[in-house]
Image (spheres, helix red, strand yellow):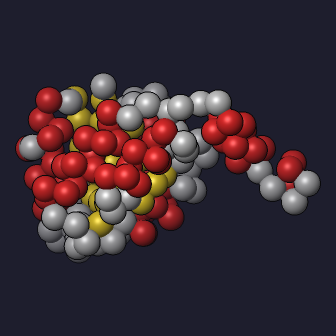
Amino acid sequence: MKIAIGADHAGYYLKEALREGILADYETLDFGTYSPERTDYPFYAFAVGEAVVGGKADFGILICGTGIGMSIAVSRVPGIRAALCTNVYMAKMARAHNDANILCLGGRVIGVGLAEEIVQAFLSTSFEGGHHARRLELLDRGPQRNGG
């Protein structure tokens, strides 16, 4: 399994901790940032999102201060289903019910231990399909084709 990962300056230390910890046994594609110097998160969000939809990675992990900016930015990439998760249950449901392909984390919100548990839950949970698949089809069609 290949994991694309990216962070801005606020997520840099958590990104490095995850790469050296729980992600050490995975092939990772690191899209930066490579230092804690101030930078703009959309660059990393778009790079990771495009790697996932382009088939270069199976999943992506994005980290900024809260995870909010990354989740908004990467959701602009067609085909991405990003989930900002702050606990293990959210990570499991993001995969099981929403088939999320990008996990967003807040480097200033959660610590390394919890982040590793969230990543483990996200990567080890499968999409359940069934009635959840129908909902994803509705999302893919968009509001104009759903009568909205």
6 up-or-down from 67: above or below: above
Q: Residue at x 27, y 46 (%)?
A: 119
Counting every numbered tag in the picture gives 0
Q: Is residue 73 visible?
A: yes
Residue 79's quadrant in the figure? top right
Q: Quadrant of residue 111?
A: bottom left
Up the image or down, 103 lies above or below 124; here it is: below
Q: Is residue 31 left or right of residue 99?
A: left
Residue at 30% from the left image edge and 42% from the top image edge: 121
Q: Residue at x 44, y 37 (%)?
A: 52
**Quarter of the image that includes the C terminus:** bottom right
Q: Position of residue 117 (x, y in %)?
A: 22, 48
Q: Position of residue 136 (x, y in %)?
A: 66, 41
Q: Is residue 44 visible?
A: no
Residue visible at 13% across and 56% down? Answer: 113
Is 37 placed above or below 74 here?
Answer: below
Question: Foreground: 5 or 1?
Answer: 1
Where residue 94 sits: x, y (%)? 47, 47
Residue that sits furthest to the right in the current view: 147
**Depth check: 25 or 129 in front?**
129
Q: Is residue 7 left or right of residue 91?
A: left
Quadrant of the rendering where the N terminus is positioned: top left
> Residue 28, how many percent across, how many down?
23, 35
